[in-house]
Image: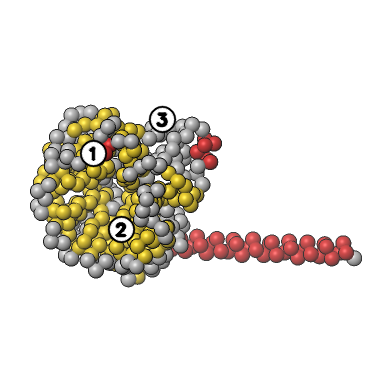
Amino acid sequence: MANDKLQGRLGMRKEIIKRNIVLLFIVCLCVESIVVSAESTIKNGSEKTKYGEYIYEDGALMAVRRNHYGILAKSVNECKVATGGYGSSVFVKKSGKKNYVYEIGLKRNRFPKHIISQKAAEFYPIGSERIILADKNKKFVYRGEGRCFFLYAHKTEKECVASSGFCKKEKVLKGVKKVWTDNGGIAYVKDNKLFFSFSQPVVGCYDDKRAGVYSGFDGRGNQIKKVVAPHYGGPVFVLMKDGSLWGMGDNSTKLISNDKTKYKEEFHNLQIKDIIDIDTNGINAVAIKKNGQLWVWGKSLKNKNKYMNKPQKIASSVREVSIGTNTHGKDKSIILYLKKGGKAYGLGGNKGYGSYMLTNKCKKKWIDKSVLLMGNIKHIYAATDMSLLLNKRKELLWTGIFSSPIII
């Protein structure tokens, strides 16, 4: 009798399992149908909301496409953007909660904010959900997935695998006072020396000869004002407090030197003086001089495959500059700059993938002369396939393509 009951229960379980498998199969078909349907909106743009047209890629990465500036977040006190190959990750601090750091995600017709930290005095984003946080005493912790390349160099696959999990709060960078991060990499000053590693590993660093933390500027680290780099291989630019600019790495677009050397293994003085700010995307470099003049070099602003090592002046009375990349077709620069009166201007790659990454007031794909984007702006951020403006009302505005691997 007991055996019959047991057999009956086993039979019921088998039926339930079969039913669940069928239901799971139906759900998978529905999900696949949704993804295919959504992908079709890339072509016909039929699915629209007040935020734009939605795009789904591989059922995991979500993106929103815009043609004019709209609000991404309100009550923003501070914003930092980590650019990357798939898109850009946006991190903010909001009014009222000065030590809260949020990453802005993506969920259908709204942009929810994911709390990264509640106690951060400073934050240095590396990429999606990868960030270094610091308290008021300059104690740094890392939060995110994987630590290959930019924090450690491993000798075996086992070491890489051990460090690949998600870390909530790992103490890092002891004795460090200055940090710069972006594009999956990090630079910092320790013991009056510069250390840097800008890279984005695909699998792990154990079998990659390029892996490791590089160093330079022995005895001059404390004189460094800023470090920028677009990706592994460089170029890496170092701006000193005396206004001099140094570079190393990729020289294929003549950002470092006018000679035929494709890669500079040592830091080279660019012989450009009185610089107070610098940014680069690897295609172009932009710099603000002490007198407020904005200069650019690298790929020709006429959108031709010509490269200029001699900086070209493009604006005056500039107090802030930022450069991103329009990845539509051949990579093109997105250049934003902010004048002292609070007016934001842009030039470069304007259109791609059906979006306007600078302004829809000008329909050109490439803008070779600066256009006024908006007034009453406090800060600007050029990113991958999008640009952002923080106005004086603390509204973070954006246009272009906002991508997010975080579906929350």
Give the amino acid type for the residue marked by disc 2 in the picture: Cys
Residue at image x 40%, y 34%? Answer: 211
**Of the residues under marks 3 and 2, which one precedes in the sequence?**
2
Name the foreground residue: 238 vs 24: 238
Q: Which residue is mark 3?
A: 209
Q: Residues within 10 Å of mark 3 (few under 14, many from 20)?
A: few
Vertical side of 12 occupied by 187: above or below = above
Q: Spatial distance from mark 3 to mark 2, Cα to Cα?
A: 35 Å
Q: Quadrant of the N terminus?
A: bottom right
Residue at the spot 28% in from the left edge and 53% down from the top edge: 383
| Distance Cα–Cα, label 1 vs label 2 | 26 Å
| Residue 306 visible at all | no
Whether label 3 touches label 1, CB < 8 Å = no
Q: Tag on residue 223?
A: 1
The foreground one among 88 and 214 is 214
To which residue does mark 2 refer?
79
Q: Position of residue 99 (x, y in %)?
A: 37, 60
Mark found first going from the N terminus, 1 or 2: 2
Q: Which mark is residue 254?
A: none
Nearer to the camera, 185 or 283: 185
On screen, residue 10 above or below 189: below
Indicate the secondary structure of the residue bearing disc 1.
helix
Residue under the point 16% across and 65% down: 375
Query: Residue type at mark 1?
Result: Gln
Relative placement, left or right, of 225 versus 154 is left
Question: Extreme right residue here?
Answer: 1
- Name the spot of residue 277 as percent of width and height, x first: 19, 47
Mark 3, secondary structure of its residue = loop
